[in-house]
């Protein structure tokens, strides 16, 4: 049984302390892994770390890990390569970690000292993995047979050297309708699930580049993510995947949707999209992303529009106009969002300078 490790204090070299060396998921020190974190040539099939990110996921973790047990990647010699499996737990208060530690798959169990959100846990995976690729995976997913091989295929194909991330076809576990086939970004900065709620009838069965990957189930080139700053842990929850995708594309990378990489997802099983928490992070992080990544006029316009709508809500109620009874139309919550943007503005503008400095490699420029 793999013993959980605490991530409260990293080892002196910045790599998590290794677990039992008898377990296949032990992470080596950087100086013992040739090319750790580097990108292979397109003809090579990389080693990959699958990072299942959990928080109070006891009802999901067994099914999630069961589906990973058969996942393999075939290298160019026909050998079946097993992925490293990590479970990165965000300080769960249920028995998620006990179930993960007892699972026959024996995943590497990393217990974070506090709940760092999906963004913080994904950032941990990118910064500590000793494989060229990391797959981030939600706890409330069940991957289909052959999912990993399909998800990794584009990296090894001609032109794969320009791909920073691949994203899965995510379908709702209950209805079989599409949940996500990549993320679209509207002019207002809202991220939209491509194909959301549509039937899985073949219309989304073609590989294509998309504006952003979905953190539900995506493979990420470690060297590319590190070069642009990894996931931003300050986002905590929501838009961390879209914001990282924006930075990657600005640096000249592509995001590829892979329809053969199928994942069944219990959408919003861990967080309620009707909750005040969802509304807060959804609105705040959208504005944060615009400030760091979008043209400055667009970011300014969207923030002013957000303030104007907030200030007009009491007037609409006063004159009897209808206002949706959802948390994102709560004046108190919207004022918290505005305060969260203004107090973070100096740090966001510093991040923006780094993002604006990102450029495609010289050889990729027209």
Image (tube, rainbow, N blue to C red):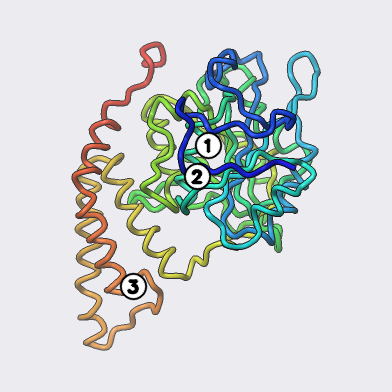
As drawn, 27 above or below 362? below
Query: Residue at 50% of width from left, 21% of height from top?
Result: 162
Image quarter of residue 20: top right
Residue that carries the numbered disc 1 in the rendered image: 125
The 10 Å Cα crowd at callout 3, few under 14, some 14 to 19, many 20 or more, is some
Give the spatial CA distance, label 1 vs label 3: 35 Å
As drawn, 84 above or below 313? above
Residue 5 or 304: which is nearer the viewer? 5
Residue that carries the numbered disc 2 in the rendered image: 121
Point out residue 322 in the picture as x, y percentages from the top left corner.
33, 82
- Ranked by sequence position, the earlier of labels 3 and 2 is 2
Image quarter of residue 151: top right
Point out residue 164 in the picture as x, y percentages from the top left corner.
50, 28
Mark 1, secondary structure of its residue: helix
In front: mark 3 or mark 2? 2
Query: Residue at 41% of width from left, 47% of height from top?
Result: 185
Point out residue 140 in the picture as x, y percentages from the top left corner.
64, 55
In the picture, which quadrant includes the N terminus? top right
**Does the residue at mark 1 contact the one at mark 2 (Cβ under 8 Å)?**
yes
Mark 3, secondary structure of its residue: helix
Residue 343 or 44: which is nearer the viewer? 343
Point out residue 226 in the picture as x, y percentages from the top left corner.
43, 28
**Does the residue at mark 3 contact the one at mark 2 (Cβ under 8 Å)?**
no
Residue that carries the numbered disc 3 in the rendered image: 329
């Amino acid at each position: 049984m793999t013993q959980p490790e605490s991530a409260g204090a990293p080892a002196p070299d910045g790599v998590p302390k290794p677990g039992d060396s008898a377990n296949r998921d032990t992470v080596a020190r950087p100086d013992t892994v040739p090319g750790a974190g580097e990108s292979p040539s397109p003809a090579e099939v990389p080693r990959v770390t699958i990072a299942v990110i959990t928080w109070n996921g006891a009802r999901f973790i067994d099914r999630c890990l069961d589906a990973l047990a058969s996942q393999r990647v075939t290298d160019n010699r026909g050998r079946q390569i097993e992925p490293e499996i990590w479970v990165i737990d965000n300080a769960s208060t249920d028995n998620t970690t006990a179930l993960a530690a007892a699972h026959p798959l024996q995943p590497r169990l990393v217990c974070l000292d506090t709940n760092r959100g999906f963004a913080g846990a994904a950032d941990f995976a990118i910064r500590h993995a000793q494989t060229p690729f990391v797959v981030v995976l939600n706890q409330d997913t069940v991957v289909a047979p052959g999912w990993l091989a399909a998800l990794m295929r584009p990296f090894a194909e001609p032109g794969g050297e320009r791909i920073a991330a691949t994203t899965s076809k995510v379908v709702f576990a209950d209805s079989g309708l599409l949940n996500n086939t990549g993320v679209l970004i509207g002019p207002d900065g809202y991220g939209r699930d491509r194909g959301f709620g549509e039937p899985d009838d073949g219309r989304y069965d073609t590989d294509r580049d998309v504006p952003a990957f979905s953190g539900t189930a995506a493979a990420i080139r470690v060297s590319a993510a590190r070069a642009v700053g990894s996931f931003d842990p300050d986002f905590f929850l929501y838009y961390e995947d879209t914001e990282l995708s924006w930075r990657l594309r600005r640096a000249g990378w592509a995001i590829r949707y892979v329809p053969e990489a199928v994942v069944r997802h219990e959408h919003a099983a861990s967080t309620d999209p009707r909750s005040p928490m969802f509304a807060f992070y959804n609105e705040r992080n959208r504005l944060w992303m615009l400030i760091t990544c979008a043209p400055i006029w667009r970011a300014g316009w969207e923030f002013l529009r957000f303030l104007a709508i907030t200030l007009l809500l009491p007037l609409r109620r006063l004159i009897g106009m209808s206002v949706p009874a959802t948390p994102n139309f709560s004046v108190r919550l919207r004022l918290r969002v505005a305060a969260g943007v203004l107090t973070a503005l100096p740090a966001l503008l510093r991040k923006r300078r780094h993002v604006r400095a990102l450029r495609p490699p010289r050889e990729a420029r027209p």
